[in-house]
Amino acid sequence: MENTSKTTTQNVDVAALIENTLAMQAVVAPKQAAFEEKRKKREARDGDESKMFRRFKIKDIVFLAIITACTLVTSAIMPLLIHVPVFGIIQLGLGLQFSIFPVIGLMKVRKAGSMTIMGIFIALFLVMMFPPMALIAVCAVVVELLVFAIFRSYKNDWACVMAGTLYMPLTVPLLWFYYNVNYTVTGEENEAVTMFLGATDPWVIVGMTAAIVVLCFVGSVIGMVISRELKKAGVLKK
Amino acid sequence: MTFFRFKTKLYPLIAIASSLFVIIFGLVVARNENLCWYLLGVLVWLCLFGCWKGVLKMLPAFIVFGGAFAGIAYASAGGDFSAALAMLNRFGALFLGVAISMSVSAVRMTRSLSQIHTPRAITLGMLISMSFVPMLKGEIGRVREAMKTRGAGSILNPKILYRAFLVPFVMRLVNISDTLALSVETRGFALGGSLYSIYKKEYPALSDVLFILGIVAGAVSVVVL
């Protein structure tokens, strides 16, 4: 008699549990369906290379970080260059490495924001070497906006080349700002510095800027050629 | 009670803030004659707070490059000693700033940034960039060794540089990046809003506050006196 009542109680409990589970499932099911739909949409968007905005994966961030490390190692001469009072010397000294490596990075990770991420990583280190150059992150954003205004995405190789070509030259105004604030054009030191600098001569500014743009273009093309070769060899997988 | 203890390792965020302060202050006030005394004081302060290794690493570079550029400034200013001193001050501030930031390890920096909820992509990228530099030197050495073994010729020749150095080097980078990404994913790193825990949290101590206060107080005295 006692066993029968126990079994009945257990059956009631199990039935209540099942009912509760079903009720919970009914509540959760729409949310889960919405989540699944969202996930599928996200996967479809990430898979579609023609889309401008795609989510970054771990491997993208890792590759961009490694490319940044390469750029940083090759730009180790920067703390010395900043004290050479010749207009545009920093950009001229770093133009090649700041165009080759970012272009390789962009040709592997063809996603909106790649340049900005590289810019942020580089800025985090450049701030230790020369604080005004940390604004290179802003240059990266400007470059990306320009590229997306013209090419819409990094799908075209020349979009990457354009980004690599404009990245470093955009820091020239920063340098001009630095010369005018730090080497303030007053006092005895300035008389020596003005002769040496060339920052007051518009022809020197135009000439140096043109040289920097040409150097960065050459670097970007080299970066593109290397990436194409690796892609052909099957190394540069997306 | 952990706040009231003297640490030989600086709190990463305070160290970076101090480093930036020294560099920016040094560049802006480079022509002040008292700045050299301030920089000397910072050097002693750094040694007291356990950054002597970074200072020792930076000192030879400062003597060589600072001396050379001060000489150039002296000559170009027509024998003006203050121009040379200003250049020396700029280099001094820069190298001291770098010495402070060198005392911070990549892992501790990442932990501190994670604690203040910096996006995972940034902390991960920073950790990789910082710790990859020594590895990169090894990779460059290996590619050059391979060049020697193959008898590729001089690296100064642009064609050889491209074919025998740049292409294999980038190829190695891509392979390392793929392996590293896999390894990072296997260890449970994920982007986005996924939850994560910090293995060992970093907290500032009284010594960190004392460190930055000393640096700022010195700067104020340079401006005021």
Image (cartoon, rainbow, N blue to C red):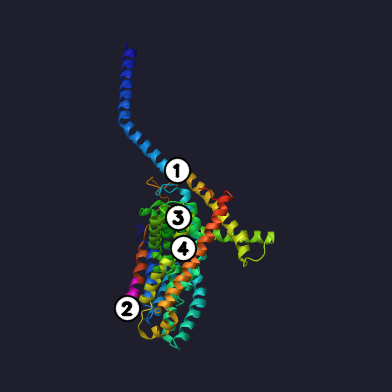
CA–CA distance in space, label 3 to label 1: 23 Å
Which element carries disc 2, helix, strand or loop? helix
- Camera-side residue: A106 or B180? A106
The magenta-colored residue range is B216-225
Q: Could you tell me what secondary structure mostly forms the magenta stretch? A: helix
Q: Position of residue B151 (x, y in %)?
A: 69, 61
Amino acid type at mark 2: Val
Which element carries disc 4, helix, strand or loop? helix
Q: Position of residue B148 (x, y in %)?
A: 67, 62
CA–CA distance in space, label 1 to label 2: 58 Å
Amino acid type at mark 4: Thr
Can residue A169 be seen at all in this image of the molecule? yes
Amino acid type at mark 3: Gly
**Residue with the mark numbered 4:** A165
- Farthest residue toward the top? A1
Assess whether mark 1 and mark 4 are in contact (beta carbons under 8 angstroms): no
**Residue with the mark numbered 2:** B223
Numbered mark located on residue B125 in the image: 3
**Residue with the mark numbered 1:** A47
Chain designation of label 1: A
